[in-house]
Structures are given as C-alpha cells and as structure tokens.
Image (cartoon, helix red, strand yellow):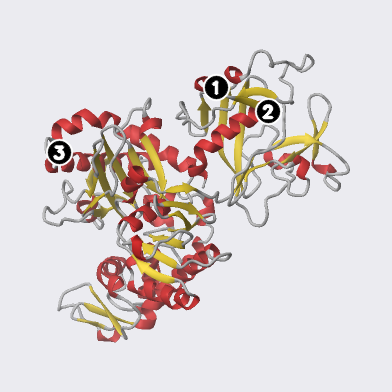
C-alpha cells in the first residue's frame, strides 16, 4: 500500500524508516522524501526467507535460535515452534512493559510470561538487536529493489536516516533505552549518532496520523471535533482523545491524558487455551501439542471471523482421520459453541471498555476510531458499537496503521500532548510545624543542622508544592532549592493508587535519593547538567558559608526552545549540554528551574 502525503516536503532529502515491532506481528514502512515534492509512504511487503508471493506487510515477531544464535525470523521461524532443536523467542515485547501496565494481568486471564522464556544465554536486548537487524536488512533490500537508483540513494542517505520506533502509550524512557541499545548492537546506528537518529513515537499518535490519512476527514472532522483513537494490538490497547484545534491547517491536541492497558489479542488466545483444556479433558486430543495447533488455527481463522452471531464455530486443525464425536471433533474440525468462544473474549473486552470509559469520563467523543490488528475483530467491533453508539459515539474501523509513524514524521499534526502521570522531584523543604503538622516523624536533619521534610508533591501546602508536570497538563515548579554549577536531579513519576503523596518517608526513598522503594513512585530519569555556562558572571554569587549558589534568582538563559544537543546513552542518565544556549534573551529564575524547564519542553512528548 502506498500513501502520498498531501503537502510538499520542506526539509533536506532523506529516507525515513519506521519500525512497528508488535507483540505478535511487525511492520516496517519508509519514505524517500525530497524537498518540494509530496513524498510517498510505502510498506515493506517482501521479506528475506518469507514466501515470495505473500505480499504481506506484516510478519510474525518470532526469532528461532540454535545454540544462542539467531537462525530464522518471522514466518520462517514459526515453522520451528514445535522443533526441540530450536529455542523460540516470541512475545518478548511483554517483557519490556512497565509494572504499571502489568497490574491487571491476573484479571485478564491465566497468561504466564514464563511460558515464553528467552533462549538460554540470550538477553532481551540481544533478541531485539537480532530482530531489528533482520527487519532493517529487509527494508534495505526492498528499498534498493523497488526504488529507481535505489542502491546509490540508500548508500548516500542511510547514514543520516531517521528511524522511528512505534511504542505503547505506557512506555517511557527506560524502554526507549533498551531499543536504543539494541539498535546500536544491531549496527543500524552508532552510539555517537543514536540520540539524533532514533525517534520514539507512541502507537496512539502513529494511529491518529494513519487514521486521518486514510479517511476523508473533510466529511467528519471540523474545528472543535473531539474524537478518540484506540489502537488495539497484540498485547496492548492504546487510547487517546483528540480535539481538532484547526481544520486548515489541520492541528490536533490531546484532550486528556492517554491510556494504555495490557489487553490485546494474545490474551484471547490464552483464554481459549483454558477453554480447550477444559473441553477436551479426557480426549486423546488434550495433549499440549494438539491444543497448541488448535490455538494457532483459532488465531488464524476462527477468531478473525467470529462476530457473536454464529451458534457454532469451527477450528480446523487436523485431517479427516481425526474424529472424536464425544468431544465435538469430526473430520479434523473441533466445534465450539458461541458461548465458549465468547468466554475467551470476556475479560479482554471488559478491560478495553473500562479503559475507554476512563478516557471518555469527562467529555463526549463524536467518533471512536478503531485501528490495530485486534481492532479488526468483528466481535470486538460489535461489542463496542453496542456500548458506545448508544451514547452518541460512532465507532469506525481503520486498517492496521503500519505507516502512521512515517506520516507523523512528515506531517506532525499533533501540537499538544497531555501527561499520563504526575511528574516531580524529591526535595527536602524546611520543616514548618504550622504546615507539616502530623508529619514530624518523617523529618530529618541535614548537614547544617536544619530540620527538613521530604516532599514529592504537595497539593495542600501550595507554597511548598513540588509537582513539576501534573497528570493531564504541564507546569513548572516554583520552589528554589540551592544548587551549584553542576546539578543532578532525579525526575520521578507517581503511578500508584490514589493521589500523589505530598510527604515522603525518607526511609522509603533512601537518604541518597537513589531509586525509591515506595510502591508507585518510579524513577524516570536522572538529569545532569553543567549550568555554569548559562549563568551571567555579573550576577553569579556564592554562599560563602556553604560554597553553593544562593537559592535566590540568578540570571540564566531563556533560550529553551531548541532541541537537546547532547544526551548520554546511560541507561538511567541524561546529560544536557547547555553551552549552545548561553546567549540571547535572559530572565530571572532559579538555575535548576531553567534546566528542568529545558528538559520538560524537550521531552514532553516522551513523558505524555
């Protein structure tokens, strides 16, 4: 499939490559963009080692290993699922999901990640590296073979080629670091340029760009229109609510924080496993191999056709010699009732509906646009229509958004994003008995003998509030702690139940401000910066007692809208190079506040 962007490309000539590595399937899209021309977005539809005539834009996300070495990929690797000579890596994306996405796993079904352990001696990063190397090579071959002068064009542009990874809404910088390291191991980027060439886009935002590109927006999208996009994939459901800010030019803004739940199509497959084990108990077809074969056929055929209206549903798994009428098996076909198939969908549908209800809790959406592989399920579509169209929300289905990331890179329709969590820092404020009554047991004494109390966010004591980026909107911390020329600040998010705690127990966060042990409080990133270069010499002064800069206002650079020029590849650390921002307009602000503002303005789309 080819899509032509509706406006001319205005940047330097480039090849843009996008990877959508899903739990069950993977797609790769690309575009060769030249200045002044409307670029085409295309999908890779030929894969090394795959059937030549398949023409599929997606391949299974599977790697077959032998003695720790990757041997086969995609559809070819699937042929070795039951071969004891090979170890299979599949569904490995689930291992990257943060704890906040796994909270509902037990409620979804009896799925156990241990059933799909990684091959012996192969790390998760290495699995990703091997798979990325394969799909990158496939993209290169396809581009060269299907583009005029393709070899020379690829050789000329590939070293500067931007690569976009589609990731779940619930992922953050820690998951991005794994993909960055895997890309370096795969050899598609080098460590020195990875930060400039690798881009990470939420699946929700990729979906909206795809959906708008493949629907006639003139018929339904107007200024002020509120609509939801739900990307229902293999393991996650990513939902985002958008408001159209402008029709011409088209500009979108997130209407609230996006949602991400672990409730994709693979959980239906796992639930049907339990149905089959119970139904076939005592049958000669109850062995794990037969049931695994039935599940694969269920996924390929039965699940894709089931819409809830069929009284009987068949799984074609064997030959005419396979019969056991007592267990509804006739000539290699197992018959299931409508109720038995619906049982496999029940928990997943409930999680999807709950997520959508949360998204639409405070405002009505005119449209709910379904995308993603599982989003094409007739049964899911019918269930959502029954629930939401009665509330005035029209449910629309769009095909899999495999090229949405490239369209995003070329158009970038979304200008405003909402944070999914509360973000802030841990800071010790001076204890005030009037403000902190009842929390004296949480106090500690600093090196200067001052009594302090740890806070993360304080919605009660506004004068000492430490929130930096509140769920659903963005703002800055007004407090002014003391820092010197070199600063290091840990940014945390609150993902626990209930409201964000405003006073923290130092014993739970550790005096060194290392990783917190308080459940729900998670470190996002360590911000390190040398801010000496942005301090004006005429106003810089030191506290002669402590040797540190005064906590009062210092004159610092206000040129904060340029992209970050240097980000280290450390797993938990980012270094901000402020040397490029020492000149230009200036204002009074705490040193650290300017650095945090710089960080937040640059990374809002990653935190959202």
Residue 336, horizontal then vertical, whole percent: 32, 81
Residue 37, horizontal then vertical, whole percent: 23, 40
**Could you tell me which secondary element the residue under label 3 belongs to?**
helix
Of the residues under marks 2 and 1, which one precedes in the sequence? 1
Where is residue 600, by image quadrant? top right
Evaluate whether residue 70 shows in this view: no
Taking the image as shown, residue 268 lies to the left or right of residue 428, namely left
Of the residues under marks 3 and 1, which one precedes in the sequence? 3
Q: CA distance from mark 2 to mark 1?
A: 18 Å
Q: Give the residue furthest to the right.
A: 434
**Could you tell me which secondary element the residue under label 2 belongs to?**
loop
The quarter of the image holding the N terminus is bottom left
Q: CA distance from mark 3 to mark 2?
A: 53 Å
Q: Residues within 10 Å of mark 1 (few under 14, many from 20)?
A: few
Decide which of 238, 24 is in the foreground and name it.
238
Q: Nearer the viewer, mark 3 or mark 1?
A: 1
Taking the image as shown, residue 366 lies to the left or right of residue 514, namely left
Residue 584 — which label? 1
Q: Nearer the viewer, mark 2 or mark 1?
A: 1
Identify residue for label 2.
Answer: 590
Where is residue 489, by image quadrant? top right
Evaluate whether residue 174 shows in this view: yes
Identify residue for label 3.
Answer: 144
Residue 230, horizontal then vertical, whole percent: 42, 61
Q: Residues within 10 Å of mark 2 (few under 14, many from 20)?
A: many
On screen, 372 above or below 86?
A: below
Decide which of 402, 539 is in the foreground and name it.
539
């Amino acid at each position: 499939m080819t899509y032509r962007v509706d406006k001319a490309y205005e940047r330097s000539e480039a090849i843009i490559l996008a990877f959508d590595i899903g739990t069950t399937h993977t797609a790769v899209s690309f575009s060769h963009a030249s200045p002044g021309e409307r670029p085409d977005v295309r999908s890779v539809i030929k894969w090394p080692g795959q059937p030549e005539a398949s023409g599929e834009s997606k391949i299974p996300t599977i790697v077959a290993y032998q003695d720790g070495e990757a041997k086969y990929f995609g559809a070819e690797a699937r042929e070795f699922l039951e071969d004891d000579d090979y170890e299979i890596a599949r569904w490995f994306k689930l291992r990257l999901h943060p704890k906040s996405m796994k909270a509902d796993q037990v409620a979804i079904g009896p799925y156990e990640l241990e059933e799909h352990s990684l091959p012996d001696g192969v790390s998760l990063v290495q699995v990703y590296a091997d798979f990325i190397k394969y799909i990158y090579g496939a993209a290169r071959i396809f581009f060269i073979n299907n583009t005029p002068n393709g070899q020379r064009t690829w050789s000329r542009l590939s070293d500067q080629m931007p690569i976009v990874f589609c990731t779940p809404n619930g992922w953050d910088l820690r998951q991005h670091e794994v993909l960055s390291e895997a890309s370096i191991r795969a050899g598609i980027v080098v460590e020195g340029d990875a930060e400039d060439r690798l881009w990470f886009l939420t699946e929700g935002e990729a979906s909206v760009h795809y959906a708008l590109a493949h629907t006639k927006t003139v018929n339904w999208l107007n200024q002020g229109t509120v609509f939801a996009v739900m990307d229902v994939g293999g393991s996650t459901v990513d939902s985002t609510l958008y408001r159209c800010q402008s029709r011409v030019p088209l500009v979108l803004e997130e209407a609230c924080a996006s949602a991400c739940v672990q409730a994709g199509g693979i959980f239906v497959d796992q639930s049907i496993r339990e149905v089959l084990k119970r139904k076939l108990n005592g049958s000669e077809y109850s062995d794990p191999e037969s049931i695994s074969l039935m599940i694969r056929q269920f996924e390929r055929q039965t699940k894709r056709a089931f819409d809830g209206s069929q009284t009987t549903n068949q799984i074609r798994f064997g030959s005419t010699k396979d019969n056991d009428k007592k267990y509804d098996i006739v000539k290699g076909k197992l018959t299931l009732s409508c109720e038995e198939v619906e049982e496999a969908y029940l928990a997943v549908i409930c999680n999807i509906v709950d997520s959508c209800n949360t998204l639409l809790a405070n405002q009505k959406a005119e449209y709910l646009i379904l995308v993603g592989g599982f989003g094409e399920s007739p049964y899911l579509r019918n269930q959502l229509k029954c629930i939401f169209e009665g509330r005035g929300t029209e449910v629309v289905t769009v095909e899999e958004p495999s090229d949405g990331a490239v369209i995003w890179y070329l158009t970038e329709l979304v200008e405003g994003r909402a944070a999914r969590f509360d973000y802030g820092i841990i800071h010790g404020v001076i204890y005030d008995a009037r403000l902190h009554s009842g929390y004296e047991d949480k106090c500690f004494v600093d090196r200067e003998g001052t009594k302090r109390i740890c806070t993360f966010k304080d919605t009660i004591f506004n004068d000492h509030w430490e929130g930096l980026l509140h769920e659903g909107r963005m703002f800055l911390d007004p407090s002014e702690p003391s820092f010197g020329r070199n600063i290091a600040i840990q940014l945390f998010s609150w993902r626990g139940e209930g409201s964000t705690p405003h006073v923290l127990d130092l014993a739970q966060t550790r005096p060194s401000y290392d990783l917190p042990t308080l459940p729900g409080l998670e470190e996002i990133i360590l911000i390190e910066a040398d801010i000496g270069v942005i301090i004006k010499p005429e106003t810089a002064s030191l506290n002669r007692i402590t040797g540190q800069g005064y906590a009062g206002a210092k004159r610092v650079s206000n040129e904060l809208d340029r992209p970050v020029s240097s980000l280290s590849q450390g797993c938990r650390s980012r270094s901000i190079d402020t040397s490029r921002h020492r000149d230009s307009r200036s204002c009074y602000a705490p040193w650290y506040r300017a650095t945090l503002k710089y960080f937040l303005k640059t990374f809002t789309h990653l935190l959202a």
